[in-house]
């Protein structure tokens, strides 16, 4: 019997789908990259799951309320819809292990690079994690991928170029793919994985 599971492209938010502007403490600061909708549409058309996984510890730190995160998610979904694309899920970790107050101050299992958000996609969406990829601009996005046996792609947008230039030589394992941006990463992953 054919497995109903599908591979997923997990995308980081800030620096990957949208400009890295520091804490997005008001929805007006959220700016999608011009290639973001095209990238997600490619994922949709390939029949892969398109899932966002983002850490927003600014909520735990008290820099902005959960409302802002929800407004940004609504903006993101609206932009995708307007461009004929859709996200299968947007998962957000708003926790921090030591900052702020409960319920957001928590040693959770979803703060990247811990795999909680990927495990959730596996349970809720049927994501086939070993066939999936995580695309992000930080080493923690790669570590997230590797923690569940997925592959990790580093984009040069956001913090990516700096991480690649100054930090990557010290990483024990290089990224499975390096791309200029999310769209290029998606095209190369889907091209490589095509039957
Ligand atoms: Mg990022
Ligand atoms: Zn969390």
Image: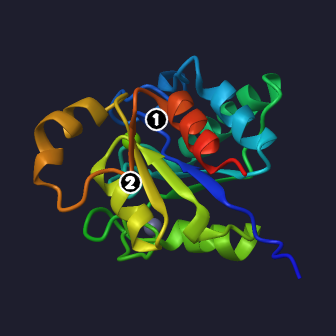
Where is residue 98 shown, x and y percent of the image?
25, 69
Where is residue 143 shown, x and y percent of the image?
34, 62
**Viewer-nearest residue: 194 or 45:** 194
Where is residue 165 shown, x and y percent of the image?
16, 34
- Confirm or deny contact between disc 1 and disc 2 (CB under 8 A): yes
Secondary structure of the residue carrying tag 1 is: loop
Does the beta carbon at disc 2 come under 8 Å from ligand 1? Answer: yes
Left or right: where does residue 57 sit relative to residue 125? Answer: left
Name the residue that disc number 2 marks: 141
Name the residue that disc number 1 marks: 16
Where is residue 73 shown, x and y percent of the image?
64, 41
Q: Give me the C-alpha separation between circle 1 and circle 2.
A: 11 Å
Q: Residues within 10 Å of mark 2 (few under 14, many from 20)?
A: many
- Counting the numbered discs, the total is 2
Q: Quadrant of the N terminus?
A: bottom right
Q: At 64% from the left edge and 31% from the top edge, which residue is drawn? A: 39
Left or right: where does residue 48 sit relative to residue 140? Answer: right
Of all residues shown, which one is farthest toward the bottom?
1
Does the beta carbon at disc 1 come under 8 Å from ligand 1? Answer: yes
């Amino acid at each position: 019997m054919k497995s109903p599971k599908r591979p997923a492209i997990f995308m980081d938010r800030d620096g990957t789908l949208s400009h890295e502007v520091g804490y997005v403490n008001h929805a007006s600061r959220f700016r999608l990259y011009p290639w973001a909708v095209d990238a997600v549409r490619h994922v949709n058309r390939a029949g892969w799951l398109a899932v966002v996984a983002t850490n927003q510890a600014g909520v735990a730190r008290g820099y902005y309320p959960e409302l802002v995160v929800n407004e940004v998610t609504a903006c993101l979904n609206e932009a995708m819809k307007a461009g004929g694309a859709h996200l299968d899920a947007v998962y957000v970790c708003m926790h921090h292990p030591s900052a702020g107050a409960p319920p957001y101050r928590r040693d959770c299992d979803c703060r990247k690079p811990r795999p909680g958000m990927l495990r959730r996609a596996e349970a809720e969406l049927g994501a086939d994690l070993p066939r999936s990829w995580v695309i992000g601009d930080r080493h923690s996005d790669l570590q997230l991928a590797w923690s569940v046996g997925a592959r990790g792609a580093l984009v040069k947008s956001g913090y990516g170029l700096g991480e690649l230039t100054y930090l990557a030589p010290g990483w024990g394992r290089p990224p499975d793919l390096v791309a200029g941006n999310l769209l290029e990463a998606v095209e190369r992953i889907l091209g490589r994985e095509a039957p």
